[in-house]
Image (cartoon, rainbow, N blue to C red):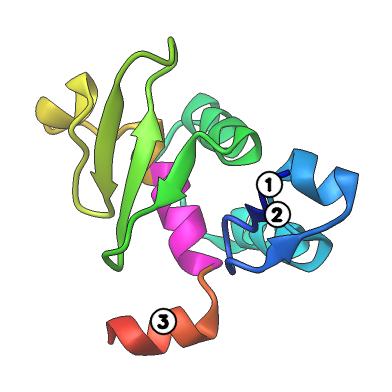
Amino acid sequence: MDEVHCLRCGRVLRSAKSIADKRGRRCKSIVLAAARHTELADYTPAQVEHANEVIEQGGIVPTSRPHLWTAVSSDGTTTYLVALQGCTCPAGLRQRRCYHRAAAAILDTARPARLARRAA
Protein backbone atom coordinates (compact mmCIF):
# COMPACT_ATOMS: atom_id res chain seq x y z
CA MET A 1 0.00 0.00 0.00
CA ASP A 2 1.29 3.46 -0.88
CA GLU A 3 1.80 6.04 1.83
CA VAL A 4 -0.74 8.84 1.94
CA HIS A 5 0.52 12.25 3.04
CA CYS A 6 -1.37 15.12 4.66
CA LEU A 7 -2.20 17.84 2.13
CA ARG A 8 -1.33 20.51 4.69
CA CYS A 9 1.85 19.38 6.46
CA GLY A 10 3.02 16.42 4.40
CA ARG A 11 3.17 13.90 7.24
CA VAL A 12 2.28 10.28 6.59
CA LEU A 13 -1.35 9.53 7.43
CA ARG A 14 -2.12 6.28 9.18
CA SER A 15 -5.74 6.27 10.35
CA ALA A 16 -8.48 5.44 7.87
CA LYS A 17 -10.38 8.62 8.76
CA SER A 18 -7.33 10.84 8.19
CA ILE A 19 -6.61 9.10 4.90
CA ALA A 20 -10.21 9.66 3.80
CA ASP A 21 -10.02 13.33 4.89
CA LYS A 22 -6.60 13.76 3.21
CA ARG A 23 -5.47 15.61 6.36
CA GLY A 24 -4.56 14.61 9.88
CA ARG A 25 -6.90 15.48 12.75
CA ARG A 26 -4.86 18.49 13.81
CA CYS A 27 -4.37 19.82 10.28
CA LYS A 28 -8.06 19.39 9.51
CA SER A 29 -8.98 21.47 12.56
CA ILE A 30 -6.45 24.15 11.56
CA VAL A 31 -7.94 24.36 8.05
CA LEU A 32 -11.47 24.55 9.47
CA ALA A 33 -10.38 27.36 11.82
CA ALA A 34 -8.71 29.18 8.92
CA ALA A 35 -11.96 28.93 6.94
CA ARG A 36 -13.77 30.71 9.78
CA HIS A 37 -11.12 33.42 10.25
CA THR A 38 -9.99 34.23 6.71
CA GLU A 39 -11.28 37.52 5.34
CA LEU A 40 -13.56 36.50 2.47
CA ALA A 41 -15.89 39.52 2.29
CA ASP A 42 -15.15 39.95 -1.44
CA TYR A 43 -16.66 36.52 -2.19
CA THR A 44 -20.29 35.49 -2.29
CA PRO A 45 -21.56 32.99 0.30
CA ALA A 46 -21.93 30.42 -2.50
CA GLN A 47 -18.28 30.90 -3.50
CA VAL A 48 -17.13 30.46 0.10
CA GLU A 49 -19.25 27.32 0.45
CA HIS A 50 -17.84 25.92 -2.80
CA ALA A 51 -14.29 26.80 -1.68
CA ASN A 52 -14.81 24.83 1.53
CA GLU A 53 -16.16 21.88 -0.48
CA VAL A 54 -13.13 21.92 -2.79
CA ILE A 55 -10.78 21.96 0.20
CA GLU A 56 -12.68 19.16 1.93
CA GLN A 57 -12.59 16.99 -1.20
CA GLY A 58 -8.89 17.62 -1.81
CA GLY A 59 -9.60 19.35 -5.11
CA ILE A 60 -6.99 22.04 -4.47
CA VAL A 61 -3.45 21.07 -3.57
CA PRO A 62 -0.27 23.07 -3.02
CA THR A 63 2.47 23.07 -5.62
CA SER A 64 6.16 23.19 -4.82
CA ARG A 65 6.01 26.99 -5.14
CA PRO A 66 4.73 29.06 -2.20
CA HIS A 67 1.34 30.71 -2.62
CA LEU A 68 0.52 28.61 -5.72
CA TRP A 69 -2.01 25.77 -5.87
CA THR A 70 -3.42 23.39 -8.45
CA ALA A 71 -7.20 23.10 -8.54
CA VAL A 72 -9.33 20.54 -10.34
CA SER A 73 -12.34 21.74 -12.34
CA SER A 74 -15.86 20.83 -11.25
CA ASP A 75 -16.10 18.10 -13.88
CA GLY A 76 -12.64 16.75 -13.02
CA THR A 77 -11.21 17.06 -16.53
CA THR A 78 -9.13 20.25 -16.26
CA THR A 79 -6.69 21.66 -13.74
CA TYR A 80 -6.06 25.31 -13.02
CA LEU A 81 -3.20 27.18 -11.43
CA VAL A 82 -4.42 29.29 -8.55
CA ALA A 83 -2.66 32.13 -6.74
CA LEU A 84 -4.06 34.69 -4.34
CA GLN A 85 -3.93 37.27 -7.15
CA GLY A 86 -5.54 35.21 -9.93
CA CYS A 87 -6.60 31.90 -11.39
CA THR A 88 -6.43 30.27 -14.81
CA CYS A 89 -10.07 29.12 -14.66
CA PRO A 90 -12.55 30.80 -17.06
CA ALA A 91 -13.76 33.25 -14.39
CA GLY A 92 -10.21 34.07 -13.35
CA LEU A 93 -9.20 34.74 -16.93
CA ARG A 94 -12.02 37.31 -17.08
CA GLN A 95 -10.51 39.00 -13.99
CA ARG A 96 -13.35 37.81 -11.74
CA ARG A 97 -12.97 36.37 -8.27
CA CYS A 98 -13.53 32.64 -8.29
CA TYR A 99 -14.02 30.10 -5.53
CA HIS A 100 -10.57 28.68 -6.31
CA ARG A 101 -9.03 31.93 -5.07
CA ALA A 102 -11.20 31.81 -1.94
CA ALA A 103 -9.96 28.27 -1.28
CA ALA A 104 -6.38 29.42 -1.85
CA ALA A 105 -6.86 32.25 0.66
CA ILE A 106 -8.13 29.79 3.27
CA LEU A 107 -5.25 27.37 2.65
CA ASP A 108 -2.74 30.20 2.71
CA THR A 109 -4.01 31.20 6.15
CA ALA A 110 -3.69 27.58 7.30
CA ARG A 111 -0.17 27.03 5.93
CA PRO A 112 2.29 25.45 8.33
CA ALA A 113 4.60 28.02 9.95
CA ARG A 114 7.72 26.36 8.52
CA LEU A 115 6.40 26.90 4.99
CA ALA A 116 5.36 30.47 5.74
CA ARG A 117 8.89 31.25 6.95
CA ARG A 118 10.46 29.64 3.89
CA ALA A 119 8.25 31.69 1.52
CA ALA A 120 9.04 35.01 3.19
Q: Is residue 106 above or below residue 119?
A: above
Crowd rating for badge 1 (residues with CA inside 10 Å; few <14, some 14–19, many 20+): many
User: According to the image, label 1 marks what residue?
Assistant: 22
Q: Which residues are magenta?
A: 102-110
Marks 1 and 2 close (CB-CB < 8 Å): yes
Res 5 quadrant in image: bottom right
Q: Residue furthest left?
A: 94
Residue depicted at 60% across the width and 38% down the height: 52
Q: Which residue is mark 3?
A: 116
Residue flagged by tag 3: what amino acid is it? Answer: Ala
Frontmost residue, 4 versus 18: 4
As drawn, 95 above or below 40? above
Q: CA distance from mark 2 to mark 3?
A: 18 Å
Circle 2: element type: loop
Residue 74: x and y in percent read: 44, 16
Reading the image, the residue beneath label 2 is 23
Q: Residue at x 33, y 55 (%)?
A: 63
Q: In this rendering, does residue 42 appear at all?
A: no
User: Does 112 appear above or below 84?
Assistant: below
- Between 116 and 61, the residue placed more toward the observer is 61
Three-letter code for the amino acid on which mark 1 is drawn: Lys
Frontmost of labels 2 and 3 is 2
